[in-house]
Image (cartoon, grey):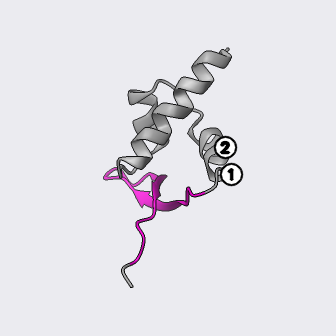
Amino acid sequence: METQQNHGSNLAAIKDQLERGWRISVQSVLHSVGTQELRHYISILRREPGIHIESVWTTADNGKRFKEYFIAKPKAA
């Protein structure tokens, strides 16, 4: 069971990866943060003002599909 302290540090680690411009997936977060609950944390982060998280479906070399999440870069005017 995830403790409140782990919840906060997981959320901070995921937010940090997104703010660094990384594209993250459930698998990548499992390895880097140690949680499979990426969709839960994305839901929380999407409610924060000023954070616009987008997602795209990606196909791996083995044909399996998964979502990648990232913060959209502002479009040049």
Dot 2 amino acid type: Ile
Mark 1, residue position: 47
Mark 2, residue position: 44
Category of crowding for the residue at label 2, using alpha-carbon neighbours closer than 10 angstroms: few (below 14), some (14–19), many (at least 20): few
Is 68 in front, or is 15?
Answer: 15
Pointers 2 and 1 in contact (C-beta within 8 Å) = yes
Rendered-image quadrant of the C terminus:
bottom left
Rendered view: 41 above or below 62: above
- Going by the picture, which residue comes out furthest to the left? 61
Is 38 in front, or is 76?
Answer: 76
Residue drawn 64% across the image and 50% down it: 48
Residue drawn 68% across the image and 51% down it: 47
Dot 1 amino acid type: Arg
Residue drawn 53% across the image and 28% down it: 10
Q: What percent of the width, then of the height, locates residue 37?
A: 60, 34
Is 62 in front, or is 41?
Answer: 41
